[in-house]
Image (cartoon, rainbow, N blue to C red):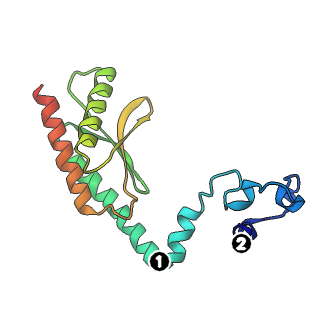
């Protein structure tokens, strides 16, 4: 416990008011045992791969994900009844399935069902979002496991979900 505390114990002007109980011989303060103190250490998500892989390799992986997002948008534009909501910002792709003469509510419900059908297959995961009042499907191509094959599976699952919904 002492090694863990020694690795993470910090003193600075902005945390002077924090009582370090272990210094007083009392119970250990959990804030002294982790990088987060009381907040999530989000920077580690970028710092760790950079340290592990190096900047050049990290850049290659990031470029791959940005290219995949652009590739996916190109493929989605060719799918009948799919509307790409916006050009990808970094690796986020947002789109929705639309039906002629459907209300905003009907389109939202349709896309909820599409999301459920895709996620139920368990091969890929998509999320929901709202963009300017439009319910949409959101994909973030960032996982180190996300490659073109996973996006091809997404397109297959999307195609099957659309077919099932439009045959109803």
Residue, x 74% and y 69% (percent of image)? 2
On the rendered structure, is 56 left or right of 84? right
x%, y% of residue 144?
Answer: 38, 65
Circle nearer the N terminus (1, 2): 2
Q: In this orientation, which residue lies closer to the viewer: 81 or 165?
A: 165
x%, y% of residue 95?
Answer: 32, 41
Q: Considering the image in quadrants, where does the N terminus appear?
A: bottom right
Seen in the picture, residue 60 relative to 156 is either above or below; the reply is below
Seen in the picture, residue 75 relative to 103 is either above or below; the reply is below
Q: Mark 1 = which residue?
A: 53
On the rendered structure, is 49 left or right of 155? right
Q: Considering the image in quadrants, where does the C terminus appear?
A: top left
Q: Measure how far apart labels 1 and 2 are at the Cα level.
A: 27 Å
On the rendered structure, is 130 left or right of 36? left
Residue, x 13% and y 33% (percent of image)? 164
x%, y% of residue 133?
Answer: 43, 29
Seen in the picture, residue 68 relative to 134 is either above or below; the reply is below
Residue, x 29% and y 63% (percent of image)? 147
> Could you tell me which secondary element the residue under label 1 belongs to?
helix
Kindly indicate the quadrant of the structure image that contains residue 43.
Answer: bottom right
Q: Mark 2 = which residue?
A: 3
Residue situated furthest left in the rendering: 167
Residue, x 29% and y 32% (percent of image)? 111
Question: Quick one: label 1, few (<14), some, or many (20+) residues within 10 Å?
Answer: few
Disc 1 vs disc 2: which is toward the camera? 2
Q: In this orientation, which residue lies closer to the viewer: 142 or 15?
A: 15
Seen in the picture, residue 16 relative to 103 is either above or below; the reply is below
x%, y% of residue 79?
Answer: 18, 44
């Amino acid at each position: 416990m002492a090694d863990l505390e020694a690795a993470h114990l910090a003193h600075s002007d902005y945390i002077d008011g924090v009582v370090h109980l272990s210094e007083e011989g009392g119970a250990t303060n959990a804030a002294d045992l982790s990088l987060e103190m009381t907040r999530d250490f989000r920077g580690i998500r970028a710092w760790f791969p950079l340290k592990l892989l190096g900047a050049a390799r990290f850049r290659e992986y990031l470029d791959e994900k940005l290219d995949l997002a652009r590739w996916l948008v190109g493929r989605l534009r060719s799918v009948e009844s799919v509307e790409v909501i916006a050009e990808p910002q970094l690796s986020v792709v947002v789109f929705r399935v639309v039906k002629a003469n459907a209300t905003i509510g009907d389109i939202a419900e349709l896309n909820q069902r599409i999301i459920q059908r895709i996620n139920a297959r368990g091969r890929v995961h998509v999320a929901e979002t709202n963009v300017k009042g439009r319910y949409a499907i959101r994909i973030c191509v960032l996982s180190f496991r996300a490659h073109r094959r996973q996006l091809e599976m997404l397109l297959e699952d999307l195609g099957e979900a659309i077919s099932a919904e439009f045959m109803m």
